[in-house]
Amino acid sequence: MQFNTTLLWLIPILPFAGFLLNGTLGRKLPRAAVTAIALLFTLAPAVIVAQLWMFMKSAGAPLSLSIASRPWIAVTGFQVNFAFAVDHLTLVMLGVVTGVGFLIHIYSAGYMAHEEGYWRFFAYLNLFMFFMLVLVLSSSFLLLFVGWEGVGLASYLLIGFYFTKDSAANAGKKAFIVNRIGDFGFLLAMFLIVAHFGSLNFADVFTKVSATPMTGGFLTAICLLLVLGATGKSAQIPLYIWLPDAMEGPTPVSALIHAATMVTAGIYMVARCHTLFDRSPYALGVVAIIGAATALMAATIGMVQHDIKRVLAYSTVSQLGYMFMACGVGAYSAGIFHLMTHAFFKALLFLAAGSVIHALSGEQDMRLMGGLRKRIPITFWTMTMGVFAIAGLPPLAAFFSKDEILYQTYLWDNPLAKLLWAVGMFTAFLTSFYMFRLWFKTFFGAPRFEEHGSSHAPDLHAAHGAAVHASKSSTLVLEAEPKPEYAGHVHGVHESPLVMTIPLILLAILSIVGGWVGVPLAFGGHNEFEHFLDPVFNPTTHIVEHVASRNAEPILAAASVLTALLGLYFAWLFYYKKPGTAAALSERIKPVYSLFSHKYWVDEIYGRFIVVPLFIISRYVLGGLVDTGIVQGSAAVATGTTRGAGSIVRRMQSGNIRSYAGWLAFGAAAVIAIVLFTH
């Protein structure tokens, strides 16, 4: 079997073409045409990736492919090509991005059907796909950084899609600014890489590192700066604060960007740079500790959230912590394995939550749900698969991937290994508890919602906004449930259309069988997934494994399953068998509950000690300098010459960030066109 490597260019270019068509013509096109463009230009890359998978798994296929244009940047002693490269790690990421991304596009056609900005939403969604695929396919730090910044831009646009709502606009700005902090670390890391290796191409840098016995030192500095970048994109301590607020965007955005793709970019980057991290045990230890701390902290906050999407948001942060911890202990394959299974079950959970919200005309507060099990059966059963999967119950996907992370952490040759394993186990218990809490509160018991009539409210997302506001205002209320207000037969609650439920069914199937590709030897499998990634990671020496330790895996797995069942039991007891138990317990441990419900006051601490001082400096100190004429006086000479030029470009400099995003996108298209046509 043969594969034409020139098709690699089409994988990101096709979604970008969809963005251009819908972004420029979508306002005048019928919705059916907008949908067709968005889906077609997302399906085509998925088909190419499927063909690429078959080729690279065939006998005699090369372990990697690459394609490059003429030199992108070339100065004396330094050159970077505009080039794509594909190895087995890239294949996994391409499969996740295009496969799950296409299913979410299908779902979006139903969920966003009544939105005025329908064309704009799909243009942004295609733009995100373009930048994410560039990130994954890049063969250099510089091109990866282009995709890295691009997904941040697209995320800002999608989170703030309801830009007339202050909460959505603020959430978009928060995500953009927090990610810039991490990106600054990434930039500094690239400067150090150029200074010490004279190149930004992955192959050149990793070859030079492997050819020398260097450890620690400046390599540790590079790795820690890369970790700073990863904590921004993958929402780890201390830069995780943007992701829960990002739930202000439409639910498909949460599923695509904040569960399956963008937030995994940091994990992917650390795994891609494993050659650097393997030479810095200190940096690896920092990664492992950050991951474990983030997993535990996010899980404790998720336990007391009432907004169904915010529970899933903190769950995402926690699961990303598991992946970070896996990379920190050198178990890169296990981290990527969980990245893949997480894409399946978390996309499913977000989309199923969207189906619940759709059924309740925008309601997101779980205290106003209940009794939906028989009203929306497809949503119930598919979400059940997602809940059981993330809880780590066999034989669903996360059982195998999460168990592998815990097992490899237990074997890590480091004094912290057993402590991190214990943190991981306790977090697994909390995960099971708060996910089954969500399950019981949403689908079981008496309905606690008001009757909406015989059909959905015409302005679904206006109700959605009101529900978000109501939910936010009640997040600090203790676990006492609102009085059930049974309204009889609620005719307005009905199952979502097929365009939404078919992706749910497919993702539910993947959540069940997705982990079977990584069944370990201890359970009669061959761990095909780990072996598939062996050419990339060259199994590291951080994991010391022998027969005795392998025999311990079933025992550790059994402990993990018992932990998940324990979480299920307490959720059943608190929210189904004896519903008042949670409220009584929260009163008894009120200081602890307050700590969790206030999210450790992290936002308040950042606001008081970082945001407010910066605001004072920028507004009153620097602003005062301008007002006194120091800056104005020095700029007066240049005013006359720039005024004429300013009038020419005034239309471009409108002060509208979305306008700037459009110019950036068109500029990127021009650069890519020049590079391709001068090849």
Image (cartoon, rainbow, N blue to C red):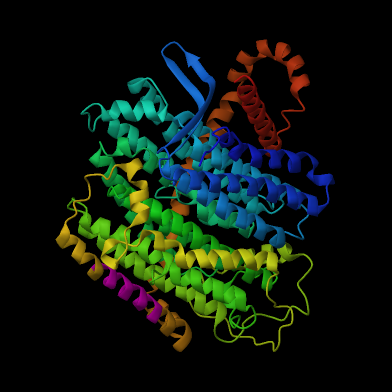
Where does the image place residue 475, in percent across and percent down from the top left?
Answer: 53, 67
Image position of 243 with respect to 345: above or below: above
**x 49%, y 57%: residue:** 343
Where does the image place residue 83, in percent across and percent down from the top left?
Answer: 51, 28
Image position of 2 with respect to 634: above or below: below
Q: As drawn, is 242 to the left or to the right of 456?
A: left
Q: Is residue 679 magenta?
A: no
Image position of 183 with respect to 40: above or below: above
- Name the residue furthest left: 548
Where does the image place residue 611, in percent across and percent down from the top left?
Answer: 50, 43
Residue 397 visible (yes or no): yes
Number of numbered discs on residues: 0
Q: Is residue 562 magenta?
A: yes
Between residues 93 and 590, which one lies in front from this camera angle?
Answer: 93
Q: Main secondary structure of the magenta part?
A: helix
Where does the image place residue 420, in percent across and percent down from the top left?
Answer: 26, 58
**x 61%, y 50%: residue:** 159
Q: As drawn, is 235 to the left or to the right of 12?
A: left
Check the picture and name the quadrant holding the C terminus: top right
Q: Which residues are magenta?
A: 556-569
**x 61%, y 79%: residue:** 377
Residue 607 visible (yes or no): no
Between residues 315 and 375, which one lies in front from this camera angle?
Answer: 375
